[in-house]
Image (cartoon, grey):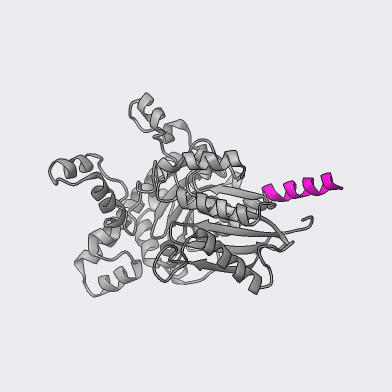
């Protein structure tokens, strides 16, 4: 295996497996794809078959799962709790630890575990690495991570702010520093990851000090189908007055709320089209979405004290000039001045959309979670590979 430089990145969901093969010698993508509808009519029966389809696709592209060029497999794992705060080489003990965290991420960790088990069966000789969505946020100070509830109860059930989208926030915060020509340690950044799921983070000198998502990905910004911040007593009200059960409320807040709940659409492009036609529900959804964004920008500006850049990323963040303009307009007192012409230009490269004179830079940086996972994986696996090679020699 000595000299192998390729990393297979796997994102195993409950009904899909997304994958990318990246050569870390030059960080070029050699293959990518997705196997969908796992366990559904017309799809493959299980994750074992899905991973075999991935292997066949890679082989057809000239780099099969059995290729000697493959250095390691990197797995996206949603929840690492307080135990896993950095990329981790997967052992039986680590896998058991990830399974123990299923109660904190019942929709995601089981599928992540399944993907790991199947990949280890197919290539038991390869180093495999778990990269956790929560890890980048593990640096939150206790004042930001703690909820103000009984401490013994919180500790017993692992109730605290964990945060998510960590690989994206880590990648984008560093890429923002590079765009400014500075080192991450010298830059304070507010990152706004705006996709169907949305989250904000406050990153001081490369270290995350606050984030919008909490115990689960439900807290924080308004999202495509999630409510974001909500008075907890709403749940009690729905139980007592509405007669709704726990699962029904869970479905309401996670799958039938957010933009979808406000106007019946969770695609910002559709909402924009409807706004242009004078649709009041679409306008309200947009306004609520933007209002929440502005609240977090203001709050995280206070947390950081000094803000060097505000960066938009992910589908909405990268492509909606209207959201960026509405979220940051009128924030001159915070040092933010947008350039309407720059902001209106679409592009796939990292770029500034603020005015030249703006004390706070506003950036658009395409996220690359797969590359972040590949880098973390190779950083652990390559030394392991070298040690194996040295030991065998």
Where does the magenta region start and end?
Answer: 380-393
Q: With respect to residue 2, does 148 lie above or below?
A: above
Whole-percent x, y for residue 381 in the image: 69, 49
Task: Return the residue nearer the eye: 246 or 324.
Answer: 246
Spot the residue most to the right.
393
- Residue 366 in view here: no
Quarter placement of the N terminus: bottom right
Left or right: 27 in relation to 93: right
Please name the predominant secondary structure of the magenta segment in the image. Answer: helix
| Point 42% across, 31% down: residue | 143
| Point 26% across, 72% down: residue | 274
Whole-percent x, y for residue 48 in the image: 53, 59
Q: Quadrant of residue 73?
A: bottom right
Task: Return the residue nearer the eye: 260 or 356.
Answer: 260
| Point 73% across, 62% down: residue | 69
- Residue 243 in view here: yes
Left or right: 168 in relation to 291: right
Q: With respect to residue 44, does 123 lie above or below?
A: above
Spot the residue most to the top.
152
Spot the residue most to the front.
45
Residue 330 forms part of the magenta stretch? no
All told, the count of numbered labels is 0
Residue 391 forms part of the magenta stretch? yes
Q: With respect to residue 344, does 126 lie above or below?
A: above
Whole-percent x, y for residue 146 in the image: 40, 32
Left or right: 257 in relation to 341: left
């Amino acid at each position: 295996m000595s000299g192998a430089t390729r990393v297979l990145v796997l994102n195993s969901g409950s009904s899909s497996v997304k994958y990318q093969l990246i050569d870390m010698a030059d960080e070029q993508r050699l293959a990518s794809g997705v196997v969908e509808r796992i366990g559904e009519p017309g799809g493959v029966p299980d994750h074992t078959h899905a991973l075999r389809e991935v292997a066949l696709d890679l082989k057809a592209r000239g780099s099969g799962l059995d290729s000697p060029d493959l250095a390691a497999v990197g797995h996206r794992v949603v929840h690492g709790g307080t135990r896993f705060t950095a990329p981790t080489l997967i052992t039986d003990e680590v896998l058991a630890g990830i399974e123990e965290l299923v109660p904190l991420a019942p929709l995601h960790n089981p599928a992540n575990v399944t993907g790991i088990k199947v990949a280890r069966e197919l290539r038991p000789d390869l180093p495999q690495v778990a990269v956790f969505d929560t890890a980048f946020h593990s640096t939150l100070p206790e004042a930001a991570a703690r909820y103000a509830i009984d401490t013994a109860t919180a500790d017993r059930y692992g109730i605290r702010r964990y945060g998510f989208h960590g690989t994206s926030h880590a990648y984008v915060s560093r890429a923002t520093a590079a765009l400014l020509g500075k080192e991450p340690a010298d830059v304070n950044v507010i990152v706004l990851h705006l996709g169907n799921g949305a989250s904000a983070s406050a990153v001081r000198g490369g270290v995350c000090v606050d984030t919008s998502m909490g115990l689960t990905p439900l807290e924080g910004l308004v999202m495509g189908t999630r409510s974001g911040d909500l008075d907890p007593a709403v749940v009690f009200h729905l139980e007592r007055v509405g007669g709704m059960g726990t699962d029904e409320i869970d479905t309401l807040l996670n799958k039938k709320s957010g933009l979808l709940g406000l106007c019946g659409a969770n695609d910002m492009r559709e909402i924009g089209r409807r706004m242009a036609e004078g649709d009041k529900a679409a306008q309200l959804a947009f306004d609520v979405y933007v209002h929440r964004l502005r609240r977090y920008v203001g709050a995280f500006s206070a947390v950081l004290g000094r803000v060097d850049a505000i960066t938009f990323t992910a589908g909405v963040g990268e492509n909606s000039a209207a959201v960026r303009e509405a979220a940051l307009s009128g924030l001159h007192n915070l040092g933010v001045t947008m350039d309407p012409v720059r902001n209106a230009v679409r592009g796939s490269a990292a770029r500034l959309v603020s005015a030249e004179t703006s004390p706070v830079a506003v950036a658009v940086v395409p996220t690359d979670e797969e590359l972040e996972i590949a880098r973390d994986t190779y950083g652990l696996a390559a030394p392991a590979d070298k040690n194996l090679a040295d030991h065998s020699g």
